[in-house]
Image (tube, helix red, strand yellow):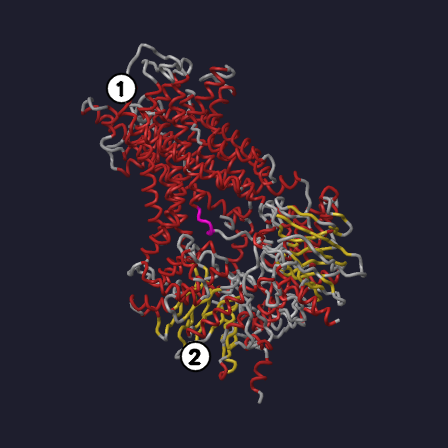
Amino acid sequence: MRGVRTRLPAMLLVGLVLAAVIVLVAVAGPILWQARADALTGDIRQGPSGAHWLGTDALGRDVFWRTVVATRSTIEMAVAATAIAAALGTFLGAMIVSAGPAVRTLGDRVIDLLLSFPPIIIALTFTAILSPGRASVVGAIGLAFCPQFARLTNRLALSVQERDYVTVARLLGVGRFRVVTRHVVPNIAPPLLVLTSVGFATSVVTVSGLSFLGLSVQPPSYDWGSLLASGLRNLYDNPGEAFGPAAAILVTGLAAGLVGDGLVRHMDPRGTSRPHRAVRRSADPPTAGDASRAGGAAPVASVRDLSIRRPDGRELVHGISLTVDAGEIVGIVGESGSGKSLTALALARLLPRELEWSAAHLNVNGVDLADPAKAPPARLATELGIVFQDPSSSFNPALRIGTQLTEVLRVHAKMSRRQAHALAVSRLAETRVSSPELRMRQYPHELSGGMRQRAMIAAAMLPEPKLIIADEPTTALDVTVQADVLRLLKQINTTHGTAILLISHDIGVVSSLCDRICVMYAGRVVEELSVEDLRRRDVRHPYTRALLAASPDTASERDGARLVPLPGRAPAAEDQGPGCSFAPRCPLAVPVCTEIVPPLVAEPSGNAVACHVETAAAEVRS
Amino acid sequence: MATTAAGAPAVRRGLARRVAGSPWAGYLARRLGGVVAVLAFLIVVTFMIVRWVPGDPARQIVGLTAGEEQVRQVRERLGLTEPLWRQFGTYLRGLAHGDLGTSFTTGQPVSSMLSQRLPLTVELAMSALVIVLVVAIPLGTAVGVAQQRGRARVATSSFGVGASVIGAMPEYIAGTVLVYVFALTLRWLPVQGGSGPTAMILPALSIAIAPAAVLTRLVRNETAAVLSQDYITMAMSKRLSNTRLLLRHVVPNVVTSTLTLGGLILVALLGGTVVAENVFNMPGAGAEIVHAIVRRDYPEVQGIILVLGLVAVLINLIVDVTLGLLDPRVLTGARS
Amino acid sequence: MTHTDESVLSAVGVSAGYGSGPRSRSVLHDVNVAVRRGGTMGIVGESGSGKSTLAQVLVGRLTPIRGVVRLDGTDVRRLSRRERFAARRRIQLVPQDPYSSLDPRMSVERTLAEAIDPRGRLRAGAHRERITELLESVALDGSAAKRLPHEFSGGQRQRIVIARALAVRPEVIIADEVTSSLDTSVQAEILELLLDLRERLGLTYVFITHDLAIAQYMCTDLSVLYLGTVIEQGTTDVLTRPAHPYTELLRDSRPDPSGRSTPAAAGGLATEDAADPANPPSGCVFHPRCRYGPRTHEDRTRCAVEPPILADLLPSRERRAACHYPIKAVIQDEEGP
C-alpha cells in the first residue's frame, strides 16, 4: 500500500506530461508538417525505413507524419464530445437532483434506461439521425456519454446533500445557492473531474472507432480512425500503417487514464472516511508478571507474553498474559486502541495476516496454538466458539442461516445433514430464537439484529465448545436486547459450564457478566480484579479509577457528583515513551513512571495491578 | 360495517403474505415492468429516427440532384406524408406482424435480412461473453486473494497497470493486432470471413480483451472487499479449508457485487460486435448497420437498432435474474 | 397544565414520517414535548423509537404531517420568511456523527466563519477574534483554526461542531446522540463541556440519547419514546421510579459498574425484540413485550386493543405515562404524606 502511494505522483506526472505533448502535437502538427503528410511519393506501401519511419500508404504518403498531423482532428473531436457529455450530463444530473421527488424518480429511471444500452449503439442511433459526418459524430458521442455524467452528478449530489454538514449549514441560515457553491460543488467536483478524464479517453477511442467504421471524417480529411482503417487494408504490406494510428490512440487513452487514476487517489480528501473500526495503537517490550491464579481447575485458555506487531515493527500489544479457567467468565475492558480485540483475535488465531505475533505460550483447551503448523483446524473449530461484534455483517448475506449454522458440524464433526439440522434447531430454540425451523431457511437480512446475535451465539454454541470468545457482542444492539444477550451468555455459562472471554469497551457490561476483569490500556493489562472489587469501586490502578469516574451511572447516590473527564489521549503506537503508557495522563505519576514500565504485580487477594505508586503503597501497608 | 372493517385487512394481509412468501413474484414483476418500459422507449426511438432527421429525410436519401418527383416517391414509401400518429399506428401494426419494413437498397424485407445476420452477431457476443467471464472471475479472484495474503507482490502490483493498459484497448486495435499476429504472421487462423469456430476466435477475442481486463480488475477489487468483510472472519473461525472458504463464502459474494457493477460491461460487448464485424468483414447485423447508416437506409437502421436494443434488454434481464438467484437480498430491495 | 407559557420550544401533537404516497413511512405518532427554558429535555429511546426524527422536526428540517412546532408559543409555520431565518438560527443541531458533520474540504476557520456570517457579507478576516473566542469556549487551541477536519480526533471534531453551533449564539441546542461514537473518557469530556456551556451561556438543550445513565446525568426533564410515541414524560425521577413498564425495562437493562443493575443475572423475563416500527402492534405498542401486560395478566386484554393515551399521573409533578396499568409504586409513594 505504502509503495503505491509514493508512486502515485509519478503516475499523475507521467500522465500530465504525455497529455501536454499530445496537445502540443495537436496544435503544431498541421501548421508544421501538413506538407510532409500530404506529399505523394512513388514509394507505395513501403514498410518502415529511415526515410519513412512508419512506411508509406497506398498513395505513397508518409504514415508517420500523417499520424502526427491527424492528431489535431481526433483530439478536437474528442474534446468537443467530452465537453458536450460533461456539460450536458452534469447539467441534467443537477437538474434532476434539484427537482421534486416525482421528476427525480422519473429522471433516475430514464438515466438507468439509457445506461442499459451500449454507448456505441446510442452513438450509432444519433449518427443515423444526424447523418454521418464529423459534427454529427461529435454530437452523437457527446449525447451517448452524457447519461454517465448525469448519473454520477446525481449520485454524488444526493450523497453530499444527505451529509450532516449540509443539514447544519442550512440550519445556520446559509442560503440554498451558497450551500451548493460552498459545500456541494467542491465535494463533487473531484470525482466529476476524474470521470471527465476517463470520458476523454473513451471519447478518443469512440471517435476513432466511428471514423474507423467510415461514419465520421470523409476523404480527403483524415484522423487516426480512418488512418487505421486504411492501415488494416494494407496490413500485410505495411503493418506500420496500422501501428502508427493504433499507437497514437492507445497512448492518448493511456495518458488520460493515468491522469484520471492519479486524480482519483490524489483528490480523495483524507478524512472524509472514518478511521478503521479497529484503530490499532501501542509501545514496548514486555514485563508481565503472570497474574494467573494458582490452583483451581485447569485453564481452558492461557496465553503468556503475547505480543502483536504491525508490519512496520510497531508493537500494538506488549507481552500480555491471560488465563481463563474452566467455567469462568473473564472480561477484558478497555477503550479503542487498548489492544483488547487484538488479544481476543490472537487467542482465536484469527489475527489479520499482516499483523505479526509471538507468545511464549498460547494454549486453548490443551491445544498448543503457539506453533501454527500444529493447530488442528477441527479441534479449534469445535472447542472454541466465537461471537462477533456486528451480527448484521458477520453472517454471510448469500447463505441461509441453516447452512451457516450447520457448517462446522458437517465439516468438522462429520455429522449428517439431518443430525446437524436437528441440533441447530434445538440450539436456536435454546437461545430463544422464535420459530427456529423457519429461521434455518431464512437469510440473515430477514432476521432482526437481536435475533441475529442470538443465532450467532447459537452457532458458537453448536459444537459444545469449552470456551466462547465474545468480542463486543452487544455493542451494536439496543440496551434491552443487550440485556437479553447478556442474560443468555450467563445462562449458557451456568447450564453448559462454558467459559467465556468477553471483550467490551463498556465497564458496566463487563461488571454485570464477568467473574474477573482485566483492564487494558495501550496494549497492556494494567489491572486485573474480581467483579466484587470492581462493583465496590475498590480499584487500584489510576486508569481504572479514571474510567469509573468518567462513566455516568444510573445509581442515584451519584446524583450531583460531576463526571471527571480523563485529561489527554491514549498514546499512539508511534509516540509511546519508555515508561508506563498512562503516565502522561496520570494524576499520581512520579518520575520513575516515565522511565520504567511497571510490572503487573499480583496481590494476595488474587487481584493484580501494574502501577509503581500503587505497588509501593501496598508494600508500605503490608 | 364491522365485518367489512375486519374482513378487508384480513384479505390484504393474506395477499401481502403470499407476495412476501415468494419475493420472486414482486421482483420479477418489477423487472418485467422495467423491460416493458424499455421496450416502449425502444419502439418510440426507432420510430422517431426517420422523423428526427434534420431537414427532409427523403431528400437526404435521394441526394441533391434528384428530381422533386423522386423525393415525393421516397417520402411516400417512408410513409412520411401521413399524420404522425397514423404513421406510428402503421409502425406498431407492422411490428406486431414482425414486419420491420423493406430495405431501400436491396428491396429485401428488413426482417429477413435480420434473420440471416442476427444469429452471427448473437453468437459473436455470446462467445465474447464466455471468454470475459471465464477469464475475469477466476483470474480476478486469484489476484485478489494473492494480494490480500501478500503473495507475489510484484505480479499483483503490476497487474493494475497491465489491466488498465489492456482495458483501454478498443476492439478495432485489438482486432488489428490479432489479425497481424495470428493470421498474417503465424498463419494459425483465417484472416477474414470463413465459417465455423475458428473464424469466431479472433473476432470474439478482439471484443473480449478490453472488457475482460476491466472486469478482472473489478473482480479483484470486489474480492479484496469481500475478504475484509466480517463474515469472512466468521467463516475463518470455522477453520474451513481454503477451497471451501473460497468457493462457499467468497466467490458467490464476489460474483454478485461484480455483476451489480459489471452488468454494463457485459452489455457493452454487444457494441463491440458492431466494430469487430467490420474489422473481420463478418456478415452480421453490426456490419450491416454501418452500411445502412452510410446509405441512409432508414428501415434497416431502425430494424437493427430495435433488435440490438432488444438483445441488450435481454442481457440486462439475465443479469438481474442471476443476481436474484445469487443474492436473496436483491429480491426484496434490501441491497441496492 | 402544559407549560406552553414557559417553554421555549415545543412540539404539539406532532406526527411525522418520510416519503409520500404508498411508500410513506410514519415514524412519530402524536408526540407532545415541551422544552423548558434553561432546562435540558432528554429524549430517550432505542433504535426505531423516532428520536432522531423528532430532532429533525424540532430543528425544522422535517415538516410534521400533523401537529405544530412552537417557538416561544408561536407556530413556526406562521412566521414570515425573515422571522423564520432568525428562528432557525436560535435552534442549532449537533449531529451524532462528527465525521459527516464537518465539510472535509473546509478548514475549521472557514467552517466557523460560515456559521458566524452565513450569507458571506463581511470580509473573510473579520471574524478572527470571534473564531478564537469560540475555539476557546470549547477548549480548543487557536492554532486549530487553520487545520482541516481530518486532522482531529472524534472528540475534537465534536468540539468543533459544538463551537459552530455556538457561533450563532443560539438559545436551544439539539444534541443528537453526540457521544455515541466516542470512548468513555472522551464522552465524559464532551458531556462536561456541554454542562459547562449550559451554565455559562444559559442554553437550553434537547438531549437525544439511547443511554439512560447519560440522560439522567445530563437532563432535567425526560421523554421516553417507544415506536414513535411518548410513553412516559416527567422530570428525571422517571428513571429512578418509572411508572411505565417500558421505562422500567430500560432502567433494568442498563448494566452499571456498581452492579446494582445486573441484567445478566439469570432468571429475568425473556424479552421479545422490539416490533418493526413500520408495522407496530395493535393497542399499546409495548404490550407484546410488557411483563405486566396480557402476557402475564390474563385480565389485561385491554392493552392489546386500546392504545393508552399519555395521561397525567401526578398533576403537581408534571408526570405523564401512556399506560393502562401504570406501576403503582410511583403514585402511592407520591400520594403518601
Q: Tag 1: residue type?
A: Ala
Q: Position of residue A237 (x, y in %)?
A: 40, 13
Left or right for C303, reference A345: left
Q: Is residue A531 above or below residue A61?
A: below
- C270 or A42, which lies in front? A42
The residue at the point 49 percent across, 75 percent down is C221
Question: On what subunit does the disc labeled 2 rest?
Answer: C
Instruction: Tell me the SS state at disc 1.
Output: helix
Distance between mark 1 and mark 2 Cα atoms: 92 Å
Q: Main secondary structure of the magenta part?
A: loop
Left or right for C261, reference C93: right
**Crowdedness near tag 1: few (<14), some (14–19) or many (≥20) residues, C-alpha within 10 Å:** few
Q: In the image, which residues are magenta? A: A268-272
Q: Tag 2: residue type?
A: Thr
Q: Quadrant of the C terminus of chain A?
A: bottom right
Quarter holding residue B300? top left
Quarter holding residue A81? top left
- A434 or C32, which lies in front? C32
Quarter holding residue A556? bottom right
Q: Is residue B95 above or below residue A579?
A: above
- C79 or B115, which lies in front? C79
**Crowdedness near tag 2: few (<14), some (14–19) or many (≥20) residues, C-alpha within 10 Å:** few
Instruction: Identify residue for label 1.
Output: A35
Farthest-out residue, front = A591
Instruction: Identify residue for label 2.
Output: C2
Left or right for C186, reference A352: left
The residue at the point 32 percent across, 42 percent down is A88
Left or right for B214, reference B143: left
Of the residues tagged 1 and 2, which is closer to the observer? 1
Q: Position of residue C7 (x, y in %)?
A: 41, 76
Q: Specify whether residue A254 is in view.
A: yes
Q: Specify whether residue A415 is in view.
A: no
